[in-house]
Amino acid sequence: MPRIKVEVDGVTYEDDVEPRLLLVHYLRDRLGKVGTPVGCDTTNCGACTVLMDGMSVKSCSVLAVQADTHDITTIEGLRINGALHPMQEAFHSEHGLQCGYCTPGMIMASIDLLRENPDPSDEEIREGLEGNLCRCTGYQNIVRAVRSAAHEMSHSEVTSHD
Amino acid sequence: MTDIQVTSPVRDGVGASAPRPDGTLKVTGEFAYASDLWMDGMLHGATLRSPHPRARILSVDLTGALKLPGVEAVLTHEDVPGAKLYGVDHADQPVLAIDQVRYQGEPIAVVAADHPETARRACALIRVVYEVLEPLTDPRRAALDPSYEKVHAGGNVVRHQPIRVGSVFEADVVVTGEYEVGMQDQAFLGPESGLAVPAEDGGVDLYVATQWLHVDQDQIAPCLGLPPEKVRLTLAGVGGAFGAREDLSMQIHACLLALHTGKPVRIVYGREESFFGHVHRHPALMRYEHGATRDGRLVYVKGEIILDGGAYASSTPAVVGNAASLGVGPYSVPNISLDAYGVYTNNPPCGAMRGFGAVQACFGYESQLDRLAEACGLDPVEVRIRNAISEGSRIATGQIVDMPAPLTSMLEQVRDLPLPEGVSTDLRDLPGGVANSTHGEGIVRGVGYGIGIKNICYSEGFDDFSTARVRLEVIGEEAAVLVHTAAAEVGQGLVTLKAQIARTELGVPNVTIAPADTQVGSAGSSSASRQSYVTGGAVKTACEAVRERLLELAAKKLSHDGLALSGGKIVSVSGIVVASVAEVLGDDVIEETREYRHRATAPMDQLTGQGDAHTQFAFCVHRAVVDVDVELGLVKVVELAAVQDVGKILNPIALEGQIHGGTAQGLGLALMEEIQVAGGLIRNPSFTDYLIPTILDMPPMRLEILENPDPHAPYGLRGAGEPPTLSSTPAIVAAVRAATGKSLMRIPVRPEHITGT
């Protein structure tokens, strides 16, 4: 059985895993990180999106062995010194969620979206989140949340440089 | 100074965009969905389902499954200790199949094992010998042909509800149409799941994602042969519902396995199993004939609505009641002859989904209104205005609408909203998007309108109530409120509203919402857009009772008459603050439990459909703007505008979210969402093949929300979740018709319906 060494939310894990084990099942069943949910099993919904070396991946379409030597961030690793990440804050305050099942994946995908494009238009936000399904919100407040987080993050970067 | 305190309303009370109490947990991944539950030593359940829609079971051999290491139980109907059948309305559905199966996916056996894969492998080792029969899949024959074979011994018609009003069925202008609605899936993102834990008293504790804890309890306990108090349910985190969790899925199975093995058992469905594990929206076959004067005023409507309920009854009777009573829409029609049928077939079972019965009918009657407009040379909005009901009008059941019904102004308002800019030159905005299928050639824009009427709360004489327990005490020198109900938070935001109501009624900012469970009385279902109304009403009433006792206590302790509670303070007649709530309470605890009922409704007459069947009506109107690639049949919805009357806005941002989400599900039904069933078999049980709208499919929305209070409802509110799901569908289809000139009699509209190829 292959042995992997992977950093997840700042903690390094070494584990023997079956080659067929999906990253999402490694996260949920081995590490107990159930904050990353499974919505569809077929890579359509994006609920299981995490960051691998800062880039978003659907963790149901990545094998645990492919995460070997890589750095994984899940929704559970986003808080900075206990404070919510601006994207988490924005999804909460802008009501970008209802049942919340898509939210971890939406937030992780949105963070990657802003990494590529810190000041996206509404159209660019929509293009960037096409791979994440939400059944509750009709997406309106999700667009609003990402826009608000983008504003907040660019603003806080400016202040931190001051 | 004290005056300012007295008059300042409590923060995050009724009317504010108060934040969700579960919001932080949901953005940090800490919110525990039912599928996240875990106990040491728990077993995993799996379900063996029938591959055939109709078959006799000749034998079931469990030997191979029982021999598999790690398997702890393999159960069939013989192991069900109590009632063998259950159902949310009629108990007609076997817990596990008995000698026959009536739909593809019907559970035959359940397994508990030490790992989910072991459980699934064990299912594969069960040998079932079937005598496969020709499935009965024609709902029209099931409804109308007495010679059609029977799915159940009692006959194929679950309910037939006629509407008979007047006797004039001739008119100058007559338009007819035959319409079809495909089978929509609720497609909540969090599949069915729950954890059953055997208890020392011989009972079981079930943690489950559901819509109505007590109706689950009422169905589970008899099948387990246990009294209800030994089957205790607690709501686990729910990943969306939309009606699909109104019926049982894994509940009884997990409890059976837990009681049999003496160990906790968790069952989590995958997406494919979810498509077989819950009921869907009824597909419908509809025939309408509308007669009108030359100036477009309705003289009569004849109609037939056949709703395919599939193998088991589920909510079919109520779906038929809605389709019949609201079958002519929000229009004044002096003469009506309409028949709604709900039938058994060997197709997948259908039951509750957002707006049930009313959604299907709305596509039919709104399509007809557009035909009438065309026949009379009228604008689609104008023909609706000429026929729309208003306060004081009668609907098809003869019931008088005794609440505001400002349909005319809503229609005018949505029509007069600014239209989006013309067809874009950016190919990303065009139908087909970055597939680069057009640079604008073949693109035609269309605009369409739809309006719907939905009954709010349970109808037809159902004893519809909710229960709330409210506790007021001092915690850490501050007054604190605990609100306990059994109402299911499924994402809609009821937890927020309950806290807002308690803050407003008691003026105490510190409100905690207890987990929903069966340790308090029933709240009824989180469906029919009813929880703000009924559980909101229960929380309000219980808070009023607590307030009354608080003032009695204050009068006693302070020896002061004429006290009132204002701004969270005890005040005298002259408005002077005499004490804080905490000072009055001291060590005393005030707890009150109250039931709240909306005003009674009556059954519909079985022959004429007449009766005051509903307690409240809600309305939404949509305008859709679409661009259609008429060569390829691709549709891009450019904008959706909606006007909805909600009576009273309790939480603006949450309410907008409900209207957005309901609108999106209507868009899905119009253009993409269908469980494709052939010969009783589901052909697309995955999100690869069952498409729900993405963020690119769902356009920006314009929203106007009106507040014309219903004098009968708490705060004047109207249920809001379902109406937008009704009207967005016909508006979008009307817009596509306007762009293409095609008749489009079936939804979802497919590209080939537009291209004709």
Image (tube, rainbow, N blue to C red):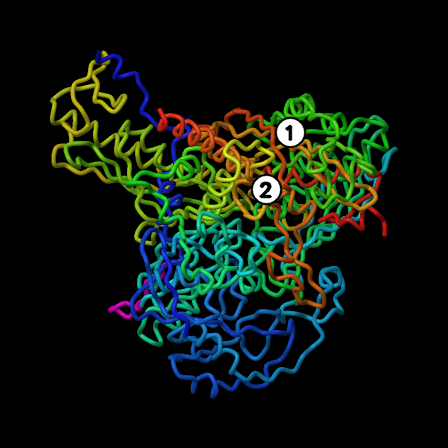
Of B64 and B567, nearer the camera is B64
| Secondary-structure class at tag 2 | loop
In the picture, measured across the screen, residue A12 lies left or right of residue A98, that is left
Q: Which residue is mark 1?
A: B393
Stretch in magenta: B198-207
Q: Position of residue B539 (x, y in %)?
A: 35, 37
Both on one chain, marks 1 and 2? yes
Kindly identify which numbered label has been placed on residue B695: 2
Q: Position of residue A58 (x, y in %)?
A: 51, 54
Distance from label 1 to label 2 (Cα)?
Answer: 40 Å
Foreground label between 1 and 2? 2
Kindly identify which numbered label has been placed on residue B281: none
What kind of residue is marked 1? Ser
| Secondary-structure class at tag 1 | loop
Of B288 and B623, nearer the camera is B623
**In this orientation, does residue B217 appear?**
no
Of B425 and B319, nearer the camera is B425
Query: Pointer 1: residues within 10 angstroms few (<14), some, or many (20+)?
Result: some
Q: Quadrant of the N terminus of chain B?
A: top left
Magenta span contains residue B205: yes
- Mark closest to the chain's N terminus, 1 or 2: 1
What kind of residue is marked 2? Ile
In the picture, measured across the screen, residue A1 lies left or right of residue B128, that is left
Q: Residue at x 48, y 48 (%)?
A: A55
Q: Position of residue A12 (x, y in %)?
A: 32, 58
As drawn, B280 above or below B662: below
Total number of numbered labels? 2
